Amino acid sequence: MSKPTRWHRGIALLRDRIPEVGVGTLAPSRTMGCMTCKSRRIKCDRGTPRCLNCSTRNLTCPGYSKTLRWKEKHQLIPSTAVENKGHHVPSSVTTPTLTPTPTPGALSVDRGASPMLVGPCPSEALPFNDKMAVLLAYYFHSVCAINSCFDSFVNPLRTEVAALLTTSRLIEFCILSMSAAHLSNSHPHWSLEGLGYLTATVSELSRAMNAVITVRPLSSAADQDLGTVLLGVIMLGMTTSWHASSGLGLEHISGSRALFRTWIAQEFTSGHAFDGAWPRLHFYLGLQAYWEAMASFLIDQDIHQLDYLHISFAIDRMKAVTVHPWTGISAVPWLYLAKAGCVIRGQRHRDRGETLRDGTSRTKKAVMAPRPLLSEESHVAHGLAKELLHYRPPSDAQIEDTFDEHTSKSQLQDLARCCQLAALVELIRSCDSVDEQQAMATLIADNCMGTSSAATCTDLLRDLSVQILRLLSGIPTDSGTRCLYHLPLLIAGSVLLPSIMSLSHTPSGDVTSDKGSACLYWRRFVMERVMHLEQSVNLEAHRRIRLLLTEVWARADALTVPQYQALTPRSLHWVDVMEDANLRFFV
């Protein structure tokens, strides 16, 4: 019989406090647990005919009949028994870590609605060990479902984390911090708990980094510890924004890059076979690629900072494709999205520098001193666009089963296609001068079937954005891919401007000159999807995406016809509006 875990105990507590997440039906109310659990001072789930703790320990469950107890309040001689004053909650975690072992039967979560605590459940009312049990159970039962494009017993965010919880306090604190932060979005009394675990995670990360540095290089212990620290840094950086007023976690990305490079160097210079190392490499590579794709639109950096991710192109396409919770069927489209973000930020940085240096607007600067026909950034964008046009998602036969009925292979392929098209949209929007736009339009027309040779960059932006939105409209709202399509949705939605959608296709496929009907239709669709993400995933970042899109559309709609007809593809870019309106987000 397997040893009971803190996950089992957390599920028992969740039965009391989160009844609608489907963890089972609570037994009829009994004011006390069984005597075996009470004597061991552990939480009893009061199940029938035997409680969970007794069943898992293969013990005899005495049941729930009340035990006769002598009342001492009428004694002439006071009792000498020491009263239990309750235990003190330490500021740091000192309890031993137990491995959560979730079973496939406990993994069914309704993706259409966010698990919510009901009724009064202040975290202060729970004993300290019970708080940890609830948070660990909440991670495996709920956070995994909203933080992965598929969720089943093969999800590495379950298996890898469960394996490391027994040995790594860093990973344990990360999980506790994530769970408390997400719970605090609907129940603010968990926010202080989350910030406390966030502080503990940062402290433990510092200690773990020192331990890794002092371990003999190229040893198996160093390799294993380095991978654990890398996972901890990524999880910390990606979820810092879950906490209120805690920043975006971007300060950790440079450290994550250094750890990833070091881990690669150790892993593939120590005589390990590539096939044996691939599962962990695939896991870390996908995490890092997604992080870079999101961060590239937020920080100014050289595009060559991403060269370390080129190992993603070394995948043998003849082998089976393992689905990744953060990048789906391939990290390649996310790498292109990251590079497209670098190009956009680079153009913005250059334009801002020219404006500050010359004291003139970008438009006046272009008239007074035109740049060369194709700038260096344009050559980079053209090279990336050409590579993007040759990318093909893996076929059904190559994709391994996810064992998740909510995430089909076709949905994962559509997601990869959306990321590819979104990156292409951003590369087109990086074109500023007429020569750059013409060169990009010619490149795409020569390499993309179904594109007219006379198409302009504006035509391409309109067509590509509608393609993205049509693909997304075919993905159900309860699909696991919903946790990943916010960036393509934002990129396509930000193109729904009068200057671009002046001639568009309606949902029925008919061409119409009524720019209002098609533009408003797709705007409604985008807003519905964003609001669904905001309600179901329940993160602050989705609210900011909604506000950002609203601001982009409002600025575009406020322009007169002569003004928006003079706009270039670079005009009214969502990154510029995000910075101007202080709506930076990370999810």
Image (cartoon, grey):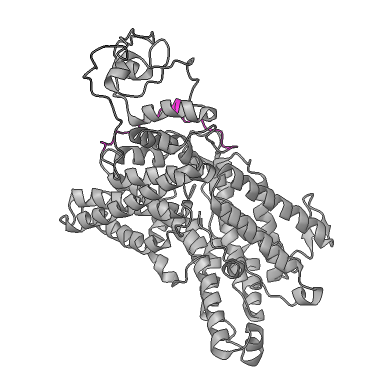
Relative to 542, is 447 above or below? below
Residue 334 colored magenta?
A: no
Q: Considering depth in this image, is 248 or 298 the residue closer to the camera?
A: 248
**Residue plotted at (32% across, 28% down):** 5
The residue lying furthest to the left in this view is 216
**Residue plotted at (60% across, 39% down):** 478
Counting the numbered discs, the total is 0
Q: Position of residue 400 (x, y in %)?
A: 46, 39
Relative to 515, is 96 above or below? above
**Residue plotted at (59% across, 59% down):** 422
Q: Is residue 233 left or right of residue 152?
A: left
Indicate the quadrant where residue 494 lies.
Answer: bottom right
> Which residues are drawn in magenta?
95-113
Q: Position of residue 225 (x, y in %)?
A: 24, 50
Q: Position of residue 158 (x, y in %)?
A: 39, 38
Viewer can see residue 320 = no
**Residue plotted at (50% across, 53% down):** 587
Q: Considering depth in this image, is 312 or 532 the residue closer to the camera?
A: 532
Indicate the quadrant where residue 522 lies.
Answer: bottom right
